Structures are given as structure tokens and as C-alpha cells.
Image (spheres, rainbow, N blue to C red):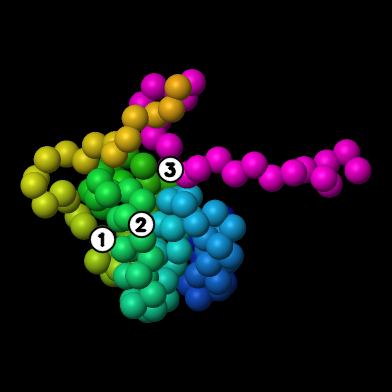
Amino acid sequence: MPWRISLRVSYSEAAKWARASDLASPRFTANVRTLIASLGAAGAIKEARDAAARLMSLEADFTLSQYERSLLPFSRRTFAPAFMAGLRAAGLPENRPDGLPATPSQAPPAGWPSGSVPIAEPVQRPLAHVGA
């Protein structure tokens, strides 16, 4: 994960790896959030804001308060403050403008676990290297 790299190397290095992940899966919002946080922490605010606008187009109900409360991926709280500061630097919304709680923007597809929300289209790629 690019963010872990930033803890040992630099936020700029984390942003480099997050960009590569984002290019591979541009609709996978976990990558986009990592890119935003890395760029924000590195001081690349314009690029972080551009990525934040794309995140909001993919996940219109995203709020920092909801993410921090329920989805923040780090169990070690030492990572959370810097990650959240990078997201905040990009200007992502703290709460919804109408004051209502954030809700999933679409229902999960048939067969997905209850309460899950799709965040990316599945990509079918041949696995030519497997078993070769």
C-alpha cells in the first residue's frame, strides 16, 4: 500500500506509487483516497484537489466524518491523523451539505454481502502467466 511507504520514505514517494495504482484501477476509490492523502501531505494541493473532485464524481456521498468514523483502513491510529490531514488539505467535505448522514450512493449487486457498496467495475484480464 502506497501510504505505508510514505511512513518510511516520503509523501512524494507514496504519491508516485499511488499514481501508479490509480492508473491501473482509476475507479477503485481506495486508491484515489490514498492518492489524495499522499498528495495533500506532500503539499501538491492542486493535484490533490483534482483527484478529490474525481473521488466525489465516483463516490458522491463521501464525507470525511463518515470515512474517519467507519471506513478508515488503519487499525493503528498513528497513521490516521496524517492520512486525514492529507484528505482535508484537498478540500474534501467534512459533512454532507444538507446535514444528513452519508449513505451509499448505489445498492450492492446481487450476490454481494449485505451492507457492501461497489466501488469499482470488475476488470476481466487474462491470466496468461498463471500456470505457465
Mark 1: give few (<14), some (14-19) or many (20+) Cα within 10 Å.
some
Q: Are discs 2 and 1 less than 8 Å apart at CB?
A: yes
Give the answer, above or below, for where 6 lies relative to 124.
Answer: below
Identify which residue, 6 or 53, lies in the foreground. 53
In percent of width and height, residue 86 lies at 35, 66
Image quarter in which the N terminus is found = bottom right
Question: Badge 3 is on which residue?
Answer: 119
Real-space CA distance between mark 2 and mark 1, rounded to the nearest whole angstrom: 9 Å
Q: Earlier in the sequence, mark 3 or mark 2?
A: 2
Question: Badge 2 is on which residue?
Answer: 55
Question: Badge 1 is on which residue?
Answer: 92
The residue tagged with tag 1: helix, strand or loop? loop
Q: In the displayed structure, does residue 46 sit left or right of residue 24?
A: left
Q: Main secondary structure of the magenta part?
A: loop
**What segment carries the magenta color?**
111-132
* Residue type indicated by callout 2: Leu
Give the answer, above or below, for where 111 lies relative to 101.
Answer: above
Going 64% across and 42% down the picture, which residue do you hit? 124
* Residue type indicated by callout 1: Leu
Image quarter in which the C terminus is found = top right
Mark 3: give few (<14), some (14-19) or many (20+) Cα within 10 Å.
some
Question: Closer to the observer: label 1 or label 3?
Answer: 3
Identify which residue, 58 or 40, lies in the foreground. 58
In percent of width and height, residue 52 lies at 33, 63
* Residue type indicated by callout 3: Ile
The residue tagged with tag 3: helix, strand or loop? loop
Q: In the displayed structure, does residue 92 sit left or right of residue 42?
A: left
Figure quadrant of residue 43: bottom left
Q: Earlier in the sequence, mark 1 or mark 3?
A: 1
Can residue 14 be seen at all in this image of the molecule? Answer: no
Q: Earlier in the sequence, mark 2 or mark 1?
A: 2
